[in-house]
Amino acid sequence: MPVPFTADDAARLKETFEFVAANGVTPGGVLAYGTTGDSPQYVSVGVVAPECGDEAPTSYTAYDIASLTKVVATWPLVGQALSNGLLDLDEPIRNLLPAMTGQMRSGEATVRQLLSHTSGLRASTRLDRYRGADLPLHELLCREPLDDVPGSHRYINRGYILLGLALAHINDLPLDDLASILWNRLGMAETVYGPLARSHRVAPTEQRIPGAPRVWGVAHDDNAAMLGGVAGHAGVFSTPVNLALYAERLLTAYADDDDAALGGWLRASLVPQTTIEPGLDRGLSWMLGVGGRVAYHHGFTGTSLYLAPEAGRYLVICTNAVYHGNARTRIAPLRALALRTISAT
C-alpha cells in the first residue's frame, strides 16, 4: 500500500520552501507531492519572477527543467526503443547513429555506459567549439578521445546529447516529435521542448549579461540552446502538474508491472550500475539513495524529481533558483529535506 505524506511532512516542506524563497534563493516555486491513486498536493511560494509582478506560481507554471530532461525525455524514450527492439543497452552508440568512418573512440561507449555516466567521455561539453566544422555533430562527438577509463562515474552531458541524436536516427523522427508523442500518450500536454513565449505562465531564468534580456522561454543550457533548444540532456519545459502526473504514471506502472516500456524499464533502471559516493549509487539515469529506496534527479535551474517506488510516493520541486545565480548549492537545504521526507516510512 502507498505510504501517504503526513501533515507534519507538508508543514516542514512548506516552512523550508518559504525560508529559502525569503532568503533570495529563488523568486518562488511549486512543490508537488503525493502517492499512487491519490490526487497530488501542491505548495506554492513566492512569485514567478519580479518581471511578473505579484503573480504567484501555480501548478500550471512552466519551468525550464534543465537536466530533468534526461529522465523525462531521454530515459523513457530509451526504454521505449529497448521495448521495441530498436537498441540494445550494451551496443556501442555508433551503431545507432548515421554511418561514420575512421576511429570512433567515444563512439564505442555503450548505451548503458551513457545512461549511467560511466562512459569515460569528455566531461566538458562546448558545442560552440564545433562551429563551422565539416562533419556532422554526432561524428564529431564520437571522434573525441576519452577523458577516463570506461567504468568510473563522472556526470557527462555529452552522453545524453549522443543518446538524443541516436533516438532521432533509429526512430526516423526528430527528438522533440518523439518526446511529444510520448508525453501526449501520458497526458502531459504542458510538457514541451522550447521555445515558449514570454508570459507570466513561464518562469524566467538567468540574466547572463547585465542590461541584456533575461533568459525566458528558451533553454538556459548553452549547449541545448545551440541545438535549437532540443537536446537529450536539457531543453524541456514542464509544469508541476505534469511532472506529478509523470511520477504517478511511473510508480503505477512499477507497481502493476504491466508496462515493459515504463514499469519494467523503471525496475531495470533502479539496479545500481556504479557508485557515486558512499551511500549513493547511479542506476540507469537515476541516482539511487537511502539504500536504493529512492530514485531521484536534479536540474541545474533548481528542479528535482524524487520517486520512492516501494512506498508509492513522489515529490517534485519546480523553481527558477538559477534566477539568482548558483541554484545548486543555495537550494540544497530544500533538496535535502525532500529526500529525507520521501524516504520516511
Image (cartoon, helix red, strand yellow):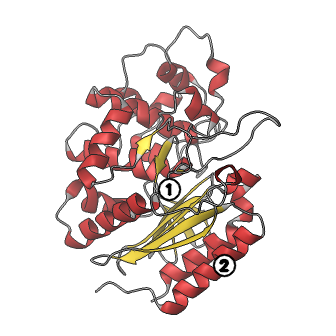
In the figure, residue 18 lies in which quadrant? bottom right
Q: Nearer the viewer, residue 63 or 228?
A: 63
Secondary element type, mark 1: loop
Q: Which residue matches tag 1? A: 61
**Does residue 340 appear left or right of residue 215 in this picture?**
left
Q: Is residue 191 left or right of residue 267?
A: right
Residue 289 position within the rendered picture, expressed as x and y whole percent measured from the top left: 52, 72
**Residue type at numbered disc 1:** Thr
In the foreground, 275 or 204: 204
Residue displayed at 50% across by 51% down = 62
Crowding at label 2, few (<14), some or many (≥20) Cα neighbours within 10 Å? Answer: some
Q: Could you give the CA–CA distance between mark 2 and mark 1, rounded to whole angstroms?
A: 21 Å
Q: Is residue 39 left or right of residue 121?
A: left
Residue at image coords 69%, 65%: 331
Q: Quadrant of residue 187?
A: bottom left
Residue 185 lies, with reference to residue 13, above or below; the image says: above
Q: In the rendered structure, which amino acid carries the disc numbered 2?
A: Thr
Tell me the tag on residue 16: 2
Q: Is residue 149 visible?
A: yes
* Nearer to us: label 2 or label 1: 1
Q: N-terminal of the two: label 2 or label 1? A: 2
Between 246 and 144, the residue placed more toward the observer is: 246
Residue at the extreme right: 210
